[in-house]
């Protein structure tokens, strides 16, 4: 159970405090309710670009990291399809430095042409190294726009095309910032050796003067139900043939999500999973195979991915994967299997909550889902999934007409 106090500023900033006197340091987590899904099709990669720009200094503070490092702090950030998260750890005695830095860049980010060009180059280089020049790096650039026809999940967080970041100008950047980076579109969580009343006072002091911006009304297109199997075939200079199969599933806070999440564990989590046991160890079709869910706020994907052994035909490999899925769909999950996946999920969640940052991000994520107490309900949600519902999820979602398959062929020499 994560115990927390909450407070909302007049400008809309939501603040949560998680007191923990056993830890001398403090985590400060500021999440903005903006991700790749909030971008325009012709200007993708902006949320990730802003993750970099937010470290480029403000009107008042040329370098964000330097003052924080001087007081013994460290920080980082990440961008997802749904939100952008900035976090720092610092001594409790120097917490106000964090408030000063975070509020300052929310209020007066530096729109310096030099900073923009520098960060664009950083992002472009990342795009090239991780997605263009890396084996299999373009998988999601090939797969997402086929699996999704309408929803903005059809492009990756890095962006659909490198030219979108290359062509980003100051007008685009300023518009994106003032639309999304404001107090009523953010949630602040402070955790550690702190007093809630003191945190609320500092929140008012540092963030209170920042004006609420024009409310952003998210109006994303709903992805239509898929009714026909889709396929993609790619050939590239890669070490092995690879097979990807994805299926549309509910979003993180929707009914059925937990059953599908556990289904993915049953199919492809670890060496005792069904896919690995049957297709790696016994039939030796794949060298590795696994399954996971994207876990997005809007309806996401269950992903099965594997690397084929030399000489294995793609069609045969896919039929064998479908056969394993059919077994789950048509037969009840055994009690030992069910207990295993429940215990794995419960243990992973409980272990993650030991870390202070994990607790802070869990509360922030729950807020974005519409219920900060979601973090405290997750264990019950996992345990409430029955054996029958795991099989039912396979029958409902893991069907051919709801799938997209990518065959990633190794280029013949």
Image (cartoon, rainbow, N blue to C red):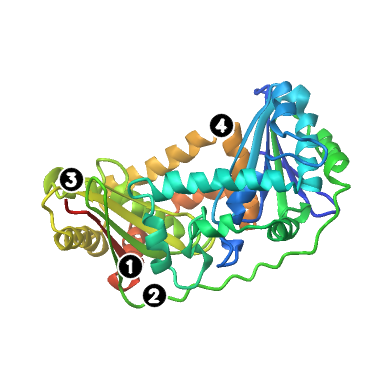
At mark 4, the secondary structure is loop
Residue 355, numbered label: 4
The answer to which of marks 2 and 3 sits earlier in the sequence is: 2
Q: x%, y% of residue 407?
A: 26, 60
Mark closer to the chain start, 2 or 4: 2
- Mark 2 and mark 4: span between their CA atoms? 39 Å
Marked residue nearer the N-terminal end (3 or 4): 3
| Category of crowding for the residue at label 2, using alpha-carbon neighbours closer than 10 angstroms: few (below 14), some (14–19), many (at least 20) | some
Estimate the spatial distance between the alpha carbons at disc 1 and disc 4, rounded to whole Å.
37 Å
Q: Earlier in the sequence, mark 3 or mark 1?
A: 3
Q: CA distance from mark 2 to mark 3?
A: 30 Å
| Mark 3 to mark 1 CA distance (whole Å) | 22 Å
Q: Mark 2 or 1 closer to N-term?
A: 2
Say whether marks 3 and 1 touch (CB < 8 Å). no
- Of circles 3 and 4, which is in front? 3
Label placed on residue 280: 3
SS at badge 2: loop
What residue would you read off at disc 1?
403
Q: Residue at x 58, y 50 (%)?
A: 48
Q: Quarter of the image holding residue 219?
A: bottom right
Q: Secondary structure at mark 3?
A: helix
CA neighbours of label 4 inside 10 A, class few (<14), some (14 to 19), many (20+): few
According to the picture, the residue beneath numbered tag 2 turns out to be 226
Q: Quadrant of residue 26?
A: top right
**For the residues bearing labels 2 and 1, Cβ distance under 8 angstroms:** yes
């Amino acid at each position: 159970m994560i115990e927390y106090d909450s407070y909302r500023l007049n400008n809309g900033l939501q603040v949560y405090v998680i007191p923990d006197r056993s830890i001398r340091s403090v985590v400060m987590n500021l999440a903005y309710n903006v991700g790749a899904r909030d971008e325009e099709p012709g200007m993708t990669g902006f949320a990730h670009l802003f993750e970099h720009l937010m470290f480029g200094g403000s009107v008042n503070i040329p370098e964000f990291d330097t003052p924080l490092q001087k007081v013994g702090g460290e920080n980082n950030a990440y961008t997802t399809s749904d939100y952008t998260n900035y976090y720092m750890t610092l001594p409790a005695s120097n917490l106000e430095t964090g408030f000063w830095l975070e509020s300052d860049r929310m209020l007066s980010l530096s729109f310096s042409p030099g900073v923009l060009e520098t960060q664009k180059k950083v992002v472009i280089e990342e795009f090239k190294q991780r997605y263009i020049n890396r084996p299999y790096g373009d998988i999601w650039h090939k797969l997402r726009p086929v699996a999704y026809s309408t929803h903005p999940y059809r492009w990756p967080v890095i962006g659909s095309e490198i030219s979108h970041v290359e062509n980003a100008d100051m007008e685009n950047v300023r518009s994106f910032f003032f639309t999304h980076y404001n107090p009523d579109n953010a949630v602040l969580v402070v955790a550690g050796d702190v007093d809630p009343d003191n945190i609320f006072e500092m929140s008012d002091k540092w963030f209170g003067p920042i004006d609420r911006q024009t409310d952003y009304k998210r109006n994303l297109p709903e992805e239509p139900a898929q009714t026909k199997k889709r396929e993609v075939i790619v050939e590239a200079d890669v070490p092995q043939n690879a097979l990807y199969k994805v299926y549309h599933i509910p979003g993180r806070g929707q009914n059925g999500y937990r059953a599908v999440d556990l289904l993915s564990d049953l199919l492809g989590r670890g060496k005792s999973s069904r896919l690995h046991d049957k297709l790696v160890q016994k039939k030796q079709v794949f060298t590795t195979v696994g399954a996971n869910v994207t876990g997005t706020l809007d309806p996401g994907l269950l992903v099965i991915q594997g690397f084929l052994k030399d000489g294995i035909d793609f069609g045969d490999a896919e039929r064998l994967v479908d056969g394993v899925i059919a077994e789950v769909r048509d037969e009840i999950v055994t009690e030992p299997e069910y207990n295993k996946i429940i215990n794995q999920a419960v243990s992973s969640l409980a272990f993650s909550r030991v870390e202070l940052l994990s607790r802070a991000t869990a509360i922030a994520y729950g807020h974005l889902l519409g219920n900060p107490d979601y973090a405290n309900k997750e264990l019950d949600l996992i345990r409430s999934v029955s054996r029958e519902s795991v099989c039912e999820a396979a029958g409902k979602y893991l069907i051919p007409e709801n799938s997209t398959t990518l065959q990633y062929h190794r280029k013949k020499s």
